Amino acid sequence: MTAEQEQRFDQLLARVRSWVEGPGESWAERIEETGEVPDELWAELNDLGFLSVTAPADYGGQGLGFTRWMELMEILSRCHGSIRMIVHVVNGIWRAMDGHATEEQRKRFVIPSVTGDIKIAFTLTEPGNGTGADIKSSVVREGDTYYLSGRKHLITFGVRCDYYLLAARVEGTTGHEGTVALLVPRDAPGLRVEDTSDTMGVRGTDHASLTFERTPVPVDHRLGAEGEGLDVFLGGFLTPSRISVAMSCVGLAQRAQQLALDHARSRVTFGKTLSQRQAIQFMLAENAADIEAARQLVLHAARRFEEGADDASMQSSMAKMHAVSMLTTVTDKALQIHGGVGYWRSQTIERVYRDARAQRFEEGTNEVQKAVVFRELLRFAEVQEGTVR
Ligand SMILES: Cc1cc2nc3c(=O)[nH]c(=O)nc-3n(C[C@H](O)[C@H](O)[C@H](O)COP(=O)(O)OP(=O)(O)OC[C@H]3O[C@@H](n4cnc5c(N)ncnc54)[C@H](O)[C@@H]3O)c2cc1C
């Protein structure tokens, strides 16, 4: 970056930090009280430019490099889980679509999603099947229209979105063959939306279960070719998205640690503050080391992605795997340091603990990440042995 760009980045970083510590905290309290994320918050995040950081300037974005974006994500993740969810998804979903969009589709879907004119929900998971090549939602083509049937669930923004970016398959196909990525309008006929927003953490974010019964979708709402559907969902987009979730773990863990440190310094038992007890000091020291180790791994993965390195996918899974485990340990110790009062809703650590748990599912569980890492290990071994080119 040039000196001028560095200066602009520092200003943006300062703006993000002061919003997170001020208005962001007020929003967090309001969301927990009401159980809702109002459109007003989306509009505020959009007006502040927090939803268009990563997209290129000619799409209406700010074109910030990925590693620098992760520095912002680290701070934004110290906020309420729903705020983190909005900035993570909106700054990522344009990338999933863009690689497969025609110029016309870029104008209709990608750019409006960057500018905040439309909201798009990432719609992959199904109640009856595994995620990925096991999906069963299917389409039948009649002329210029697909008729979509099937079910999806756990869909973030599934109630309030304008379009579902949805994975299905041409009826009769299996595996990756015949999969399609479709932009399905929220108000399409034959679609039933059930509001399933009552989650443990990330309160206020809307989630939905969807049932499609011969829902018509124009063929020109398909991104890429038939057979490329899962590439849109599991291709190049997933690597940066995993790194972003991994950085979210780092930011949230920092928040938990700060809360624990503050509590340990002020709570007095038997004439001494908790921070004077070695058992508590050790917990805080371990947390600090674990957070920093994860942070460095995430930044390394971010740089490898930005460089277009061959091991970027493996690095992203390693970073996500490591960071979510770290977050689990750090939030558990931070809650322990709070004592019983930390279990009460009046304490911020109670929300942080619940929000943290969601991150072990996003962009694939650790079991899935390990499968990716192992697949890549095998590939690298075979390349080294000359059995694969
Ligand atoms: C807050 C939240 C928001 C979400 N938002 C979205 C969204 O917007 N869009 C969307 O499409 N999805 C969304 N999801 C779904 C999420 O991506 C999935 O929950 C996650 O990928 C796990 O899939 P599953 O729930 O179907 O678990 P399952 O596949 O039922 O797995 C259950 C357990 O078994 C393990 N497992 C499953 N298969 C295997 C295997 N072959 N080998 C070893 N272990 C295995 C898993 O790791 C997991 O621990 C969201 C989930 C949450 C919690």
Image (cartoon, grey):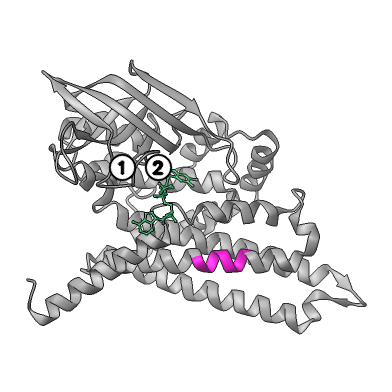
Spot occupied by residue 24 in the image (x, y as percentages of width and height): 61, 46
Magenta segment: 325-331
State which quadrant residue 316 falls in: bottom left
In the depicted view, which residue is nearer to us: 46 or 193?
Answer: 193
Q: Is mark 1 within 8 Å of ligand 1?
A: no
Name the residue furthest bottom: 278
Q: Secondary structure at mark 2?
A: helix
Residue at 52% x, 32% y: name it: 196
- Compared with residue 277, is residue 207 higher up or lower down, i.e. above or below? above
Residue 23 appearing in the image: yes
Query: Does 376 sit left or right of 79 as displayed?
Result: left
Name the residue furthest right: 271
Residue at 47% x, 28% y: name it: 159
Spot occupied by residue 59 in the image (x, y as percentages of width and height): 28, 40
Residue at 13% x, 37% y: name it: 226
State which quadrant residue 187 falls in: top left
Is label 2 in contact with label 1 (beta carbons under 8 Å)? yes
Name the residue furthest top: 189
Main SS category, magenta section: helix
Which residue position holds label 2? 90
Spot occupied by residue 281 in the image (x, y as percentages of width and height): 71, 80
Query: Does 362 sit left or right of 305 as displayed?
Result: right
The N terminus - image quarter: bottom left
Identified by mark 1, the residue type is: Trp
Residue at 8% x, 72% y: name it: 388
Which residue position holds label 1? 94
- Compared with residue 331, is residue 111 higher up or lower down, i.e. above or below? above
Spot occupied by residue 25 in the image (x, y as percentages of width and height): 65, 47
Q: Is residue 76 magenta?
A: no
State which quadrant residue 264 falls in: bottom right
Identified by mark 2, the residue type is: Val
